[in-house]
Image (spheres, grey):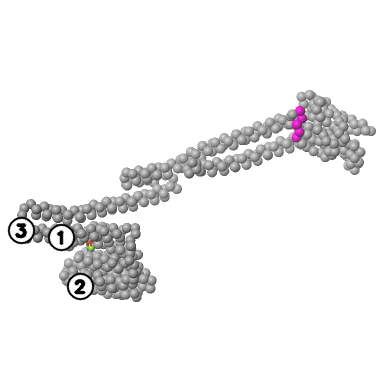
């Protein structure tokens, strides 16, 4: 249950609100309690003082000069005000008729004015015991303690039934508690609605994502009409889906291209075989059919091999046999392999620059990289006295190799796409010379695996320059 954000937010919010309102409620309750009791106590004190002024003593005779008003206030049987006048020894001199048979509680020895709440006939009553020494009433403080010690002086007790006031405080606390509960209920409902409304866009985003993964990859999360806080989330989901869709389409295109490339030689093998089998052929005819079939099978084998290389280089865990590689040496090896082809086409290959840079890399893959690039340079150079210039240099952390030819060049609009799998600028021309369109994709992957990249510049009719950047050894040169 608490795993839901909505529940957690509301629970936290309710706990905080409950604590705050309870603290406020307790504060308000005690404030009112104090105000009410202060009012009762000060009224009792004024009354008891007023009573004290009405008491006089002459030769051990105590007289009470109570007016009718006073008598009416205390002596009505229904009155909720009481008084009792005692000596210090506890003997009662006078008490209000409202007390009837009851007595206001008193303990001998009490000699201080005190206030307390008692229960008189079961009713909560506030009582003040007012110590009024004889001479205090006459304004002579020095004599008062002597009089008290002899048992003289008076205790005037005044009390008031405070049930109404206690009822008032109780009603107030009930109203306060109900108000707190009501506020909590309203806040919980409001909080629930706000949380629900705030989380609706997240639900919508997740529903759209479900739809996208289930049905089509072209649908996107709407970035309009959603809170600004969630717009970034929606935008990053959309970016992810954009790249997923692109990758998915690339994959689809790749599968279609691969099947297409394999179908051509396969249909050559099938049709040649079928035609040959229709009737008896001469040995020469069989030889022709077989050589066409072998050529088509070789083509298929090349495609499959390159596809396997690409698949291996694209897997998450490519195992590289890392060793120190002298770039100059590797390039010489590649040139040696391609020299027969270059000589056949009358193309001269030149190596210059710093041939000593060393990199940590996989010898077989790096050889494949340079063979592929040189193969292109030779393959796509048909002009007389064609040249391939290879220049090696060190540039910061990179070992840079430039392979420049004087060939046909690549139109600018195709430059971005030559690294795509199966992409050929002139499909029929490339096919004629055995190009499948996978060489540069393989080269790009190999460069990337060695912490580098490949850049290509070209001008139609002038030639192409391919630059390979590979991460060099720390000190950069000698093997
Ligand atoms: N040096 C170059 N000069 C002119 N065009 C080039 C050059 N290098 C590459 N290209 C163009 O780029 C395309 C892709 O090259 P890539 O090496 O990937 O494929 P390919 O050479 O056709 O086939 P293969 O898979 O056998 O290498 C080529 O078909 C060609 O049109
Ligand atoms: Mg190639």
Q: Name the residue under label 2.
A: 348
Residue 381 in view of the camera: yes
Give yes or no for residue 120 being in the magenta stretch.
yes
Residue 466 in view of the camera: no
The secondary structure type at the circle numbered 2 is strand
Q: Quadrant of residue 417?
A: bottom left
Please provide percent x and percent y for residue 99. Answer: 80, 27
Please provide percent x and percent y for residue 285. Answer: 7, 58
Q: Give the range drawn in magenta.
A: 117-121
Up the image or down, 53 lies above or below 261; here it is above
Q: Mark 3 points at which residue?
A: 282
Q: Which of marks 2 and 1 is nearer the N terminus?
A: 1
Up the image or down, 249 lies above or below 22; here it is below
Left or right: 174 as drawn, with respect to 44: left
Near-viewer residue (406 or 345): 345
Q: Mark 1 points at which residue?
A: 295
Left or right: 292 as drawn, with respect to 135: left
Give yes or no for residue 306 being in the magenta stretch.
no
Please, which residue is most extreme toward the top here?
77
Q: How far apart are marks 2 and 1 (CA)?
A: 29 Å
Q: Distance between the residues labelled 2 and 3?
A: 44 Å
Tally of marks: 3
Contact between labelled residues 3 and 1, with CB atoms less than 8 Å apart? no
């Amino acid at each position: 249950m608490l795993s839901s954000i909505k529940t957690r937010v509301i629970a936290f919010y309710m706990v905080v609100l409950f604590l705050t309102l309870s603290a406020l409620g307790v504060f308000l309750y005690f404030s009112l309690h104090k105000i009410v009791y202060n009012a009762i106590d000060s009224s009792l004190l004024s009354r008891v003082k007023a009573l004290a002024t009405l008491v006089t003593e002459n030769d051990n005779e105590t007289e009470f000069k109570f007016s009718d008003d006073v008598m009416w206030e205390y002596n009505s049987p229904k009155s909720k005000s009481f008084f009792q006048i005692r000596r210090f020894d506890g003997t009662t001199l006078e008490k209000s008729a409202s007390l009837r048979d009851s007595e206001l509680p008193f303990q001998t020895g009490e000699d201080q004015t005190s206030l307390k709440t008692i229960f008189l006939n079961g009713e909560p009553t506030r009582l003040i015991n007012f110590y009024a020494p004889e001479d205090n009433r006459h304004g002579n403080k020095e004599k008062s303690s002597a009089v008290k010690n002899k048992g003289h002086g008076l205790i005037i007790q005044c009390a008031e039934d405070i049930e109404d006031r206690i009822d008032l405080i109780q009603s107030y606390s009930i109203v306060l508690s109900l108000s707190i509960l009501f506020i909590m209920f309203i806040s919980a409902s409001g909080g629930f609605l706000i949380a629900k409304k705030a989380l609706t866009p997240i639900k919508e985003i997740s529903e759209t994502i479900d739809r996208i993964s289930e049905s089509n990859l072209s649908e996107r999360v709407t970035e309009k009409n959603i809170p600004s806080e969630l717009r970034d989330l929606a935008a990053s989901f959309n970016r992810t889906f954009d790249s997923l869709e692109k990758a998915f389409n690339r994959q689809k295109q790749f599968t279609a291209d691969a099947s297409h490339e394999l179908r051509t030689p396969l249909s050559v093998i099938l049709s040649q075989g079928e035609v040959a089998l229709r009737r008896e052929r001469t040995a020469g005819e069989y030889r022709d059919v077989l050589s066409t079939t072998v050529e088509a099978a070789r083509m298929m084998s090349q495609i499959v091999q390159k596809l396997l290389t690409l698949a291996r280089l694209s897997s998450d865990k490519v195992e590289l046999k890392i060793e120190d590689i002298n770039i100059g040496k590797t390039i010489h090896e590649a040139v040696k392999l391609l020299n027969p082809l270059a000589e056949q086409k009358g193309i001269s290959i030149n190596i210059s620059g710093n041939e000593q840079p060393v990199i940590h890399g996989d010898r077989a893959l790096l050889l494949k990289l340079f063979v592929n690039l040189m193969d292109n340079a030779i393959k796509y150079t048909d002009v007389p006295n064609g040249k391939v210039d290879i220049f090696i240099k060190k540039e910061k952390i990179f070992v840079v190799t430039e392979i420049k030819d004087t060939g046909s060049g690549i139109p600018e609009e195709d430059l971005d796409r030559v690294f795509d799998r199966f992409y050929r600028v002139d499909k029929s021309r490339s096919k004629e010379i055995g190009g499948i369109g996978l060489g540069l994709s393989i080269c790009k992957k190999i460069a990337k695996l060695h912490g580098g990249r490949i850049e290509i510049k070209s001008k139609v009719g002038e030639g192409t320059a391919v630059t390979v950047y590979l991460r060099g050894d720390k000190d950069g040169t000698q093997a």
